[in-house]
């Protein structure tokens, strides 16, 4: 692990480990991966449990939709605040404080029944995520260093996917064992576990105290779109979400009505995609040369869409499973590489703001896609909806690759070398 970033970056990194930077970095990466995985599992425990609770309380699809909105809108609205905190306050302190606050809110959520209270506390819980996630992202390059950044990013994504897989299974078991209250209390315990992991980190990321003080709300977005390499990658990745996320509405109809595969087939398709994501995130990012990461991220985005769309040509379960496995590989690799490219292209003093802006854009796109998914299924059918959902990322990837090729030769030769000198917006 690099013990100190260049002074020009505006953020210093230190390790208090007596065992040396390498040992400290490996230990802290394990702690961060644990925190990410536990947090993701807790998120899905809460989402599924609260969905069941709101359904039982109200029987209203609008109420369930409002719950989903409460899990996304604060990420978008509070992105500037979360990014600025991550870039102005020592990152482990931000992660620790946000996780402790989330543990308290999640505990209260287990004992609240009125719909208004559930929605308010859910939004408050998501607000904590808007603060914690940029800090977690900013810590990964600080812990890993430039040489191990791609592998570390893949490890974080794989931990997240493991949590996504475990969360629904844990939610089902906990609700069956002790009802929704037990499941929500376990979710609260997951935040306490994240706080313990944050407290155990030895790496410290010390931004300049006034690094983000004079920036406006768009500083993180400018950090992403002001870079010639990042701009086409980020625009393609976010634009593709407008299509690919619409598949969430179509998949259950496709599996049950087109494939005739039932609940087990639906679970198998979900598992195939998740397995592909874990493989793509763990095994492939470190094999991509640094200068090719932006192009590789776009190719992986295209592969994600291809896997989803191509399998509809056969409309049988084995083809669907194979296509979703391939699409999942592209998804996992794309997420890890985009995360790496952002960390490498944006000056470290602006890592929190850049990731917060990217995460807000993703959530906004997913909100739009979820709203459009039902309309697409109704108008075109589930099979054609998946074709559309897959073609979107493929087209976005081709447009992004074309934009990369149009760059000046000196920009391409510079590749993905980190920007050690901050721009006016990184100060």
Image (tube, grey):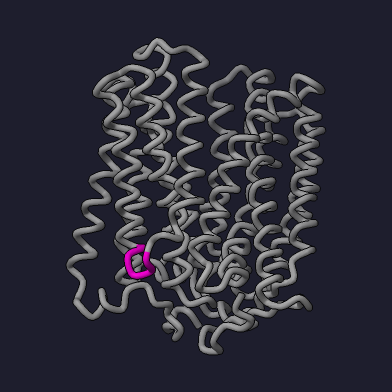
In the figure, is residue 57 to the left or right of 326?
A: right
Indicate yes or no whether the magenta region holds residue 340: no
The answer to which quarter of the image holds residue 187 is: top right
Residue drawn at point x = 74 percent, y = 23 percent: 175
Instruction: Give the residues drawn in magenta, as a range.
Output: 289-293
Where does residue 230 sit, x and y in percent of width and height? 35, 66
In-image side of 114 versus 324 (left or right): right
> Which corner quadrant holds the N terminus?
bottom right
Please state the horizontal and vertical placement of residue 177, each as a whole percent of the image: 80, 21
Location of residue 62 in the rendering, given as x and y in whole percent from the top left corner: 53, 26
Q: What residue is rendered at 37% in x and 72% in y? A: 416
- Using residue 410 as the reference point, say whether residue 363 is left or right of it: right
Q: Position of residue 64 (x, y in %)?
A: 57, 27
Residue in view at x 69 percent, y 40 percent:
42
Question: Is 166 displayed left or right of 395 in the figure?
Answer: right
| Residue in the picture at 63% in, 21% down | 55
Residue 291 is inside the magenta segment: yes
Residue 210 appears in the figure:
no
């Amino acid at each position: 692990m690099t013990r100190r970033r260049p002074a020009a970056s505006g953020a210093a990194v230190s390790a208090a480990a007596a065992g040396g930077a390498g040992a400290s970095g490996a230990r802290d990466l394990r702690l961060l991966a644990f925190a990410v995985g536990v947090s993701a599992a807790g998120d899905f425990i809460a989402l599924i449990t609260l969905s069941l609770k709101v359904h039982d309380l109200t029987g209203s699809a609008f109420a369930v939709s409002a719950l989903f909105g409460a899990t996304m809108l604060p990420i978008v609205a509070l992105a500037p605040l979360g990014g600025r905190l991550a870039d102005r306050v020592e990152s482990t302190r931000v992660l620790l404080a946000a996780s402790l606050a989330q543990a308290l809110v999640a505990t209260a959520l287990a004992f609240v029944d009125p719909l208004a209270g559930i929605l308010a506390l859910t939004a408050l819980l998501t607000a904590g995520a808007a603060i914690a996630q940029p800090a977690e992202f900013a810590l990964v390059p600080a812990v890993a260093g430039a040489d191990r950044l791609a592998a570390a990013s893949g490890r974080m994504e794989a931990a997240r996917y493991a949590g996504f897989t475990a969360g629904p299974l844990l939610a089902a078991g906990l609700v069956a064992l002790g009802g929704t209250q037990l499941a929500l209390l376990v979710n609260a315990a997951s935040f306490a576990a994240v706080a313990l992991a944050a407290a155990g980190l030895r790496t410290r990321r010390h931004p300049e105290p006034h690094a983000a003080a004079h920036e406006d709300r768009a500083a993180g977005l400018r950090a992403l779109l002001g870079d010639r390499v990042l701009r086409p990658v980020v625009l393609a990745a976010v634009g593709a979400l407008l299509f690919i996320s619409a598949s969430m509405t179509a998949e259950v109809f496709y599996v049950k009505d087109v494939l005739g595969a039932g609940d087990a087939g639906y679970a198998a398709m979900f598992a195939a995609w998740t397995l592909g994501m874990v493989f793509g995130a763990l095994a492939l990012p470190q094999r991509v040369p640094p200068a090719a990461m932006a192009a590789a991220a776009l190719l992986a985005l295209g592969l994600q869409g291809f896997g989803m769309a191509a399998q509809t040509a056969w409309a049988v379960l084995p083809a669907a499973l194979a296509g979703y496995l391939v699409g999942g590989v592209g998804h996992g690799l794309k997420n890890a590489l985009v995360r790496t490219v952002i960390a490498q292209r944006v000056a470290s003093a602006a890592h929190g703001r850049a990731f917060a802006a990217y995460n807000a854009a993703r959530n906004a796109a997913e909100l739009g896609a979820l709203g459009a998914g039902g309309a697409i299924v109704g108008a075109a059918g589930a099979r054609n909806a998946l074709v559309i959902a897959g073609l979107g990322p493929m087209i976005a990837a081709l447009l992004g690759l074309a934009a990369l090729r149009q760059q000046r030769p000196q920009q391409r030769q510079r590749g993905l070398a980190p920007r050690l000198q901050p721009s006016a917006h990184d100060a």
